[in-house]
Image (cartoon, rainbow, N blue to C red):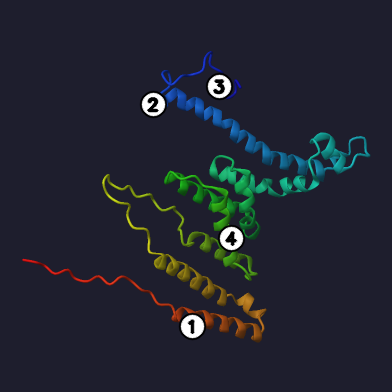
Amino acid sequence: MEHWALSLPDADATPESAHGPLNEDEQRQLAEAHKAVDNARTARWMLGFSLEVVRRRRLYRGDGTRTWEQYLTQEHDGLSTSEADRLQKTWRLAQAVQKELGRPAPDSHLRKLEPYAERTSNEQAALAYTTLYWAHQKQGQRLIAKQVQQRVSRAVGAAKGVSDPVERTRAITEAWTVTPEGPVPAQRQEVPNGQSDPPSADPVDTALKLLQSAREAVERATEDKSARRGRTEGEAQRQQESIRRIGRILGKVRVEGEVIEEAEIVG
């Protein structure tokens, strides 16, 4: 506690004694209190690092007869082998994110980020996550695990079937950047008092942006030479027909709007 420069007050603060924005000293105390959260998250990936050291050096054997499973039961309160394996698998990603971000990321975010790291690298995933994190912070928005998962799914999906590591990394990186919602969350618009809320974006325009991204993804996929070599002529014909069928379906779509009649001007 002394390390964090925190101490309990002699009496609880009241609405009368603590009101308005935090002063400089209160901001410092809050920042120190938050270090406990960061320390807990750092300890999480450091546990994975230490488990890997113990396992790879076989330090778990004790008197020479103890097994890895017995070690986890006795020294880690019954930690399961599957959870121990996961901690060993992910600590490098957690370390890379903390180094890039300047603070540890929530465990739930790291789990969603794993597919990105597996297909690129821990460092590339850490850079992408950090960019997304600070984009949300800049807009005063909190990044949640579901948003990380959605963006990772789109990025990874764009590289499906790409075997070349360099091309796969490029496709994932581009898809991460050009997803429909963009790298920066939409800024909230303030509505002046007495005015109604501004109209929401036309869903047709939103759908068109999705189609544009899908078209670009299909074009990149068709240009993938490694995938082309492994594709049979029959498979290519099937895929081509699917693309044409989608085009025919879209060709039947009709966009309708309200007819605005000119009002008669009375002089």
Query: Which residue bears the numbered disc 2?
Result: 20
Using the rendered view, name the quadrant where residue 102 is placed.
Answer: top right
Q: Is residue 136 above or below residue 72?
A: below
Counting residues from the N terminus, which is met first, the one under dot 3 or under dot 4? 3
> What SS does tag 1 mark?
helix
Mark carried by residue 153: 4
- Spatial distance from mark 2 to mark 4, Cα to Cα? 43 Å
Task: From the viewer's perspective, tell me whether residue 212 is left or right of residue 159.
Answer: left
- Spatial distance from mark 3 to mark 4, Cα to Cα? 42 Å
Query: Which residue bears the numbered disc 1?
Result: 248
Q: Is residue 23 above or below residue 232?
A: above
Task: From the viewer's perspective, tell me whether residue 1 is left or right of residue 66.
Answer: left
What residue lies at 45% left-to-right and 67% top-to-bottom? 207
> What SS does tag 2 mark?
loop
Within 10 angstroms of label 4, few (less than 14), some, or many (20 or more) residues? some
What residue lies at 62% left-to-right and 79% top-to-bottom? 228
**Amino acid type, label 4:** Ser
Which quarter of the rendering shows the N terminus? top right
What residue lies at 57% left-to-right and 24% top-to-bottom? 4
Contact (Cβ within 8 Å) of mark 3 with mark 4: no
